[in-house]
Amino acid sequence: MIVDATPRLKIIISEVWRPLLGLFVWDCIVTVTYFVLPFKAPSLPLTLFGSALALFLGFRDNSAYQRWWEGRVLWGAMINASRNLARAARNFLPDPEARDLKRSIVLRQIAYVNALRCQLRRQPKDGEVLHYLSRGEAEPALARVNTANGLLDGTGRRIEDARKKGWIDTIQQASLERILVDIANAQGGMERLKNTPLPNQYRFFPAFFTRLFCILLPIGLVETLGFATPIGSTIAGLMFLAILQIGDDLVDPFANTIHDVPLTAMCRTIEIDLLQAIGDEAPEAKTPVDGILW
C-alpha cells in the first residue's frame, strides 16, 4: 500500500506509459495528416463522449474501491479476532500444565494468518508455517489444499482436547469456538474477494471505451489545437488512462502489488500482539520502504 501523502507521477506513468506512447504516436499521425491532406474530418462531440466515459469510469472505480475497502475491513476483523483468541487462551488456561497448549494455540494463530496471507497472494506458504510450528505439528495442515483452514481446524481440536482434560469448561469452549467462527467468516470473505473477479462487463467495456475515446480525441481536437494536438490530446488521454488504471489497481486487494492491502504489516501486527499476550519477545513492526507498506 502506498502511504505517501502525494501520489508519485512516476508510478502512474510506469503503469500507463505503453498505451500513452501509442496515443502520442497516433496524435502525431492525426496532426500531420490534418495539415497534409485536403480532406478535413468532421468535428466530434467529445464533450458528450468524455462526460459519459467519466461517469462510467467513476462507477467502475467506486466498485473497485469497495472491494479494496472490504478486504481491509475483513483483515481488521482478523486482527481483532486474533487478539481475542490469544487473550481468551491466556485467561482460560492459567494452569501451568496447560502452558504448552496455550502457546500452541497462539503460535498456530500466527502461522494461520501468515499462511492465509500467502494463499491470498498466491505465494509459497510452507516456509511461513514452519517458521512458527514444528514440521510434525504443521504437516497435517500443509497436506491440505487450504492450509490456513487446516490450521484453524487443528486449533479447534486442541481446544476440544483442553476441555477433555478439564482445563476449560463447555462455556469457555463455546466462547473460543465463537472466535474461531469469526476467523473462519473473515477468511471466507477474503477468499470470495480473491476468487470472484469483477464481471467481464466491468473489465472489458471501460477499457474498450477508454481506448476508443483516446483514438477519437486527436481527431476532435486537431482543428482547435493545431500543432499542439499531440501534447493536449496526450495529456487528456493520460487522465482517462490513469482513471482506468486506478480501477485495475484496486480491484484485487490481495494481488501482491504496491496498491494492495498491507497484509505483511498486518500479519506482523498480529504476531507482535499475540506474542506479547503470552509474555514472549516480539519482533519489530513493519515500516514503509520507499513509501510502500507491504
Image (cartoon, rainbow, N blue to C red):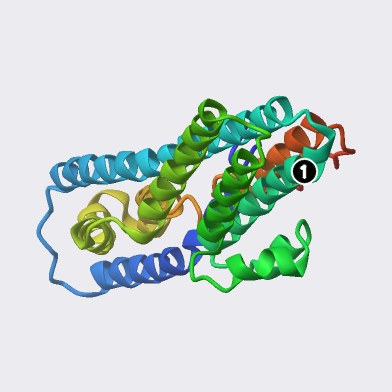
Front in this rendered view, residue 210 or 25: 210
Q: Is residue 163 above or below residue 144?
A: above
- Residue 257 appears anywhere in the view: no
Residue 157, percent from left and from top: 57, 51
Give the residue at x 90% y 38%.
281
Q: Give the residue at x 55% y 64%.
A: 147
Q: How many numbered discs, if any?
A: 1
Horizontal arrangement in the rendering, residue 19 relative to residue 108 (left or right): left
Q: Secondary structure at mark 1?
A: helix
What residue lies at 73% left-to-right and 29% top-to-bottom? 90
* Location of residue 286 by image quarter: top right
In screen coordinates, is 272 left or right of 165? right
Q: Is residue 49 above or below residue 272?
A: below
Farthest residue to the left: give it. Answer: 42
Residue 60 percent coordinates (x, y): 28, 46
Work out whether residue 55 or residue 46 is closer to the camera in this orientation and state it.
55
At horizontal 54% and vertical 67% (from top left) the residue drawn is: 122
Foreground residue, 8 or 194? 194
Q: Residues within 10 Å of mark 1 (few under 14, many from 20)?
A: some
Could you tell me the amino acid type at mark 1? Arg
Residue 179: image location, x then y, percent: 52, 34
Q: Position of residue 53 (x, y in %)?
A: 21, 47
Nearer to us in this view, 264 or 239: 264
Q: Quadrant of residue 270?
A: top right
Q: Is residue 58 visible?
A: yes
Please give left or right for residue 18 compared with residue 28 in the image.
right
Quadrant including the N terminus: top right
Instruction: Quadrant for residue 5, please give it.
Output: top right
Whether residue 270 is situated above or below residue 23 in the rendered picture:
above
Judging by the rendered image, the residue that carries numbered circle 1 is 103
